[in-house]
Image (spheres, rainbow, N blue to C red):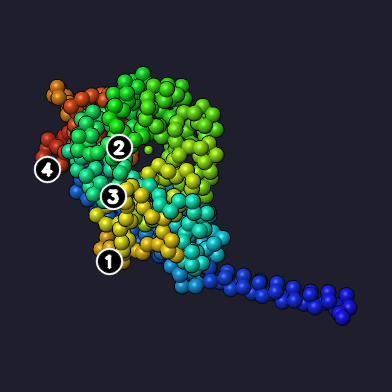
Amino acid sequence: MWSRREFLGTAFAGWTTMASLRSAERAKSNRQLAIAHIERTTVRVPYRPIPERNMDRELPHWRYSEIVEVKLKSGHVGLGETLLYYTWGVPSAADVKRALGENAARLMWDDSLGAGLQMALFDAVAKWAEVPVHALLGKKVHNRTPLSWWNIETSPEDMVAECKEAQRRGYTAYKTKGRPWFDIWAQIDAVAKAMPKSFKLDIDFNDTLLDAQRAIPILRELEKYPHIGIWETPIFQRDIKGNQEIRRQTRVPIAMHYGTPDPLTAIKEDVCDGFVITGGASRVMAQAHVAAMADKPFWLQLVGTGITAAFSLHLGGVLSHATWPAVNCHQLFTHNMLTEEIAVQNGYAKVPDRPGLGYDLDRDALDRFRVPKPKQRPEPARLIETVWPDGRKMYVANTGRVNFHLDLARKGKIPFFERGVTTRLVPDDGSKRWRQLYEKARQQAFITK
Ligand SMILES: [Mg+2]
């Protein structure tokens, strides 16, 4: 029989051995998870032809992406990316410096690191732990997650061609913009004639219907088409009464970007049917849980090539209310930067269960599209012409602001939605006439008759 003293002594010795083993284990994993190297590569990924001729009006700079590769002491390499000129956060040189040598698991929830670096940390830690990224984010509640095709506003013909391509690739939803410089009636009618009712159009007006009085007749007319899935931000989100009125008088669900009005007001006043959620991992999880509490669906809006889309799949897997199709925009590009496609079937992609993101970087594409990182957002000269059936022509040119064209519509400074209107980028033919129109439009958008 052991004396009480002997027993306690033995138990204590055992406990201290276990504790020191545990702390040795911890030190070892700390060393393995230490960030040894961070590689950043800027790429300029080409657009496919239809996105190209439409994105080049206002968003030529979405081609630029920074690929981030984080190597841990363990040898595991994590992959991430930042779309340099449309993101919630670009990793800076200071972010890279403070991450080096740190434990990747300790840092990965820090949104202030920026998109590509944070994504790469999640991928690296998940690979080290031999689990999919979604296992680090929460409990998987969906095996498949919905994805939307995306393209900016286009002519009705281009829109039909893109919808057909989306359908061919397994998508059942197409997200685009509603703009007063295109004929929204003709766009929707053309798609409705070409596509089955089960194929949905989700249309973001970015406030351009301006107020409930002007928005309601247009929305009611358009929502007779069964193809309309969701309207996003038809009028200013801060207009609580106006948005309530729109919801009362229309049938199609309304999406709003989370944050305006503040989420408590948005929920209490019931201004929308669901949300658009974007940002770093911590912010997305926090906002997604508020949406779940309010029982509001949302779509994840994490924009980039296939790398960002792959990360988004994992968030979609753990978030109960991520049931509206995610907007990742990787369909814009000729190449998704991954060694394989993200397969979509009946509008859904599988939430990956392989370790890490579950997708690998295409190194050939990285070499092919590699460019020096621009010092600032490239701003090619662009002259945009809008033509109405009565002969009016409007000229708008880039001003250095991202939403230069949209801002005019939001301020009511260009004609409201009309039938028969169309818009194109006027190619610079080197003529004196082009230069004159461009210089004048740069000063101020103008209309000729
Ligand atoms: Mg939007």
Question: Which is in the foreground here, disc 1 or disc 2?
Answer: 2
Tell me where residue 352 appears, x and y as whole percent: 41, 59
Give residue 429's mark.
4
Q: Residues within 10 Å of mark 2 (few under 14, many from 20)?
A: many
Instruction: From the image, tell me which residue sits under label 2.
Output: 201
Label 2: element kind = strand
Question: Which is in the foreground here, disc 4 or disc 1?
Answer: 1
Task: Say whether disc 3 or disc 2 marks the residue closer to the N-terminus.
Answer: 3
Tell me where residue 332 appears, x and y as whole percent: 27, 49
**Is the Cβ of the residue at disc 1 closer than 8 Å to that at disc 3?**
no
Q: CA distance from mark 4 to mark 2?
A: 36 Å
Task: Say whether disc 4 or disc 3 marks the residue closer to the N-terminus.
Answer: 3
Name the residue rendered at 36%, 18% in the picture: 213
Instruction: From the image, tell me which residue sits under label 1.
Output: 364
Q: Quadrant of residue 306?
A: bottom left
Tell me where residue 251 appears, x and y as whole percent: 37, 27
The amino acid sitting under disc 4 is Asp
The quadrant of the image that shows the C terminus is top left
**Is the Cβ of the residue at disc 3 closer than 8 Å to that at disc 2?**
no
Q: CA distance from mark 4 to mark 3?
A: 39 Å
